[in-house]
Image: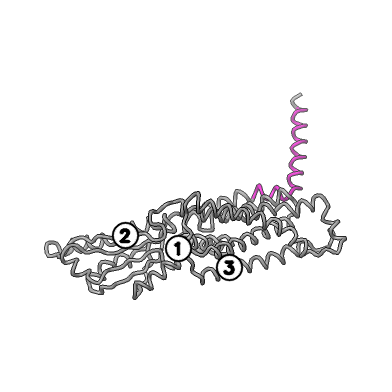
Amino acid sequence: MRSQFIVRLTALTRKETRQMLRDRSNLMVGLLLPVALILLFGYGLSFDVRNAPVALVLDDNSAIAREAVSGIEGSRYLAPVRVDTMARAQDMLQSGKVDAIVRVPIDFSRRQAAGRATIQLILNGIDSTTATSLEAYVSASVSNVMLRRMDREGAMSRGGSITLKQRTWFNEASISTWYLVPGLIVLVMTLVGAFLTSLLIAREWERGTLEALFVTPVRPLEIVLSKLLPYMVVGLIDLATCLLAARFLFQVPIRGSLFAIVLASTLYLAVSLLLGLFISGRTRNQFAASQVALLTSFLPALMLSGFIFDLRNVPIAVQVIAQLLPATHFMGMVKSLFLAGTDWMMVARNCTILAGYAVVLIFATRRTLRKTLD
């Protein structure tokens, strides 16, 4: 009785193993998904702040002023850039080239001798997590320098401690909703775009209906566009819902151009839809297409686009991969458009990149629909 059980179990296991090996798409998902997740979370997830760019404006260029900021220049967490004017530093903060401004006022040395010196710190509130870390790093750097000076000079030391006057721009109250909601729009556009279309062509391949289209005069480009346009309408309705919810439900300010937000979102939606169509055309299998869409669109958009943490804090290889993702270019742009205002140079650069992805994906998807029967 027991031997018959083992015989049947062995036979069934052998059958299932052969079926598993024949279904390569399922096997690849089972083997690649854990590897992708461990690499994404292991290398891509980091809340540390390193080499954060900081504009340093020294209106007072005295020895004591330079000494006060020497700790910032020697910090491994900060990458200070000397800037001549405050106006130039503000432009750099507006365009996202720096995360903070440290300004030493013109009367710093006189006020320091009187024991009431101040240094101004302006933080970029678009990323509230980085802003909080930067405030701690700058405060510690300045305090350590002045403590060392007092220890060195002892009773001969003149002046007292330095007060750091901190302000946060673009998200003055550090409201997390303001930071998260624009990023959630990117994730919604990714999910709606890639997943809706990732099943379309694969379903037709599985049902054999695509071959029926091949005997008609319809061209592959026409098939791609006909599948793209209805879902563009659905995606734009979702975009309008997201924008209305962001503005009126969550009270997120829209300080940039609404036209630029809609233009960039439309381009990104087209890229996501076309990516789903390309995956669908290549895999020709609905289950595999949905899994590949998850791995190549939603997970990277969640982990490597800058939604959760600053990409400058991850290894160079991960940064290169992140820059290859359309979501990375859309994420930074839409956050800036919502909270900081419109930097048309940044909008033009990122929209051009998204348009380039759309063109490449149109031709790549068209090639998956060549009128040949395997």
Q: Quadrant of the N terminus?
A: top right
Which is more N-terminal, label 2 or label 3?
2
Instruction: Pick the residue in front: 244 or 309.
Output: 244
Query: Which residue: 66% across, 65% down?
Result: 358
Is 278 positioned to the left or the right of 101 in the image? right
User: Residue drawn at (52%, 63%), measured in percent from left and top?
Assistant: 333
Write down the residue under mark 1.
340
Q: Main secondary structure of the magenta part?
A: helix
Q: Residue 45 location, x and y as percent?
A: 49, 53
Q: Residue at x 32, y 71 (%)?
A: 57
Query: What segment is highlighted magenta in the picture?
Result: 3-31
Q: What residue did someone put label 3 on?
A: 351
Who is closer to the viewer here, 250 or 58?
A: 250
Identify the mark at residue 166; answer none if there is no mark.
2
What amino acid is labelled 3 in the image? Answer: Cys
Residue 18: x percent and y percent? 76, 44
